[in-house]
Image: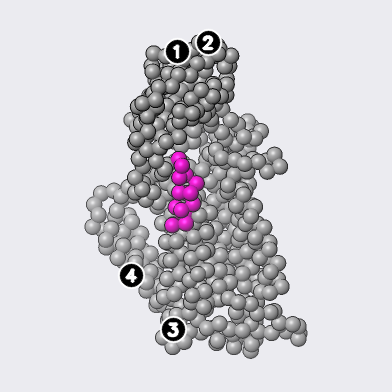
Amino acid sequence: MFPQLAIPSPLIGAVLLAVGGLWIRHWRRKEDPEERKVWQFGVVLCLAGAIGISNVLGTIRWGTYGFMTMAGCVAVTVLGVRWNLRHRLLGMEHTIELLLITGVCGLLGARAVFLVEQWDVHFADRPPILRVGLLPPGGLSAGDELRLLVHGRDRVVVRFRGDERSLTDVVARIEEQAGAHDVVARIVTTQHRGPEGVEVRERGLLLETGRTGSEASLSIDPACAFARRLGPISGTPRGVDVPWLKTLDLRMGGQTYFGAVIGVLISGLLYLRWRKARVLGVLDALAPTLPLGLFFGRLGCLGYGCCWGRELPAGSALPGLSFPRWSPAWRQMLDERLSCNYDPLVTQVAKSRGTLPPELEARLGEIAQGTPPLHAAQLYEGLAVLGVALVAYLFRERWRTREGQTFALVVLLQAPIRFVVEHLRRDHDVFWSLAGYPMTESQTAAVLAVAGAVGFLVWLRRHGRAPAGAAKGTEAGSQVEAAALPAEGGAGVLAEAAPAAPAGGGDAPQESGP
């Protein structure tokens, strides 16, 4: 994994100059004025980038995920513009507008879904939190007490009976005697998907209050028996006010793929309806770029070290990926071996990437130097969606009979891939059961996407219309192409054309709205 790329600035400038030179060569060959504008725009971008970067001294350090995301955006933009102009669907200016608007809205949608999913974890005001370790082998004794000070004024004493042999018993006793004083107790667990289903491990006990923010506080008397038996106790005795500006902090990640798809589709459909363009035709033209963009994103995930897979079975013929110490995958496996009150110590050591204390080193076992071989989930999905992009392109060029079929095909192929790859991933910790199978949010979205794509294909079969130029080579096809040409000065939306009647006197497909 390479979270950061170190790129010499002269190398970037040289690459941009080379690309600009190739684009100038293609620009001179184009007779279509719309396509000439595309190449001219690309040449200007390349030359401006080369000149700007040539003034940057030293080495440019760029996050791998951000770099691959940018590369994906460039590929999607260039191909999207080219294919839209080739199919005579939108003019140059409106094609650029569409890609810019959907790009921005895609980023906003990706962030919005992340905020909804992680609001309580990262962005809401936090309560005071105390982390307590696992129970000792003998549990608690009769007469042991937990003495708490809540919000600086309420003194609460919880007395144990001695029959508490599990954290579940301890939580029940605390809620029984301290629940009325705004004290909440819950068990901290880690869970991930394994070969036999979801594996759950207890890491300790969490004490907090129902009130959040800096006005809330919670502390334990260190002299009480509970603290002596279960210590050390760590955490934040006072709540935290989280500033709303943290929602804009992209350094913590937070770009979900399905959120990006939602943002792109909604903004794109609204824009195309506003411009009165052939919505399904444009979707077909851009459909192969959707999995292509995800291909670059998954390469970024591989470099950063996120979205890791679960352990390969012993003797597997598949090549595995092993992530080093302090990678996200290794940190997950480390947390599974530690009580939750070791978190601050591990975090402190992680900042310096130093050596763990000997008492923790002994618990690492087979992950002493890194993770065991894991499924290359990022590459599985990346290579699979690259194949989807190729299949979608060939289908659009050779076999589609209705506008919108290519887009539906992309969804129909890509969603099952995501479902299968999710089954091989280890990083998820939220599941719900469907007929005994643990489903993630992405798998749920994939199932709904397949159902929607199938329904859309059935609707297209009955009500869809043939793509413009389907009768190319015939007199009717020539009329379609002529009707699709832009008006004079036409950088705007190109005129719609009625599909040609099929040969043999059959019924023409019914017209539908854009």
Does residue 159 belong to the magenta stretch? no
Magenta stretch: dominant SS?
A: helix
Q: Residue at x 54, y 47 (%)?
A: 379
Q: Secondary structure at mark 4?
A: helix
What is the x, y in percent for residue 91?
46, 78
Does residue 115 belong to the magenta stretch? yes
Q: Is residue 486 visible?
A: yes
* Residue type of the residue flagged with mark 3: Gly
Residue 225 - label: 1
Structural crowding at the residue carrying mark 1, measured as other residues with C-alpha within 10 Å and reported as few (<14), some (14–19) or many (≥20): some
Comes first in the chain, label 1 or label 4: 4
Q: Is mark 1 in CB contact (under 8 Å) with mark 2?
A: yes
Q: CA distance from mark 2 to mark 3?
A: 85 Å
In front: label 2 or label 3: 2
Residue corresponding to mark 4 = 44
Quadrant for residue 313, please give it.
top right
Q: CA distance from mark 3 to mark 1?
A: 82 Å
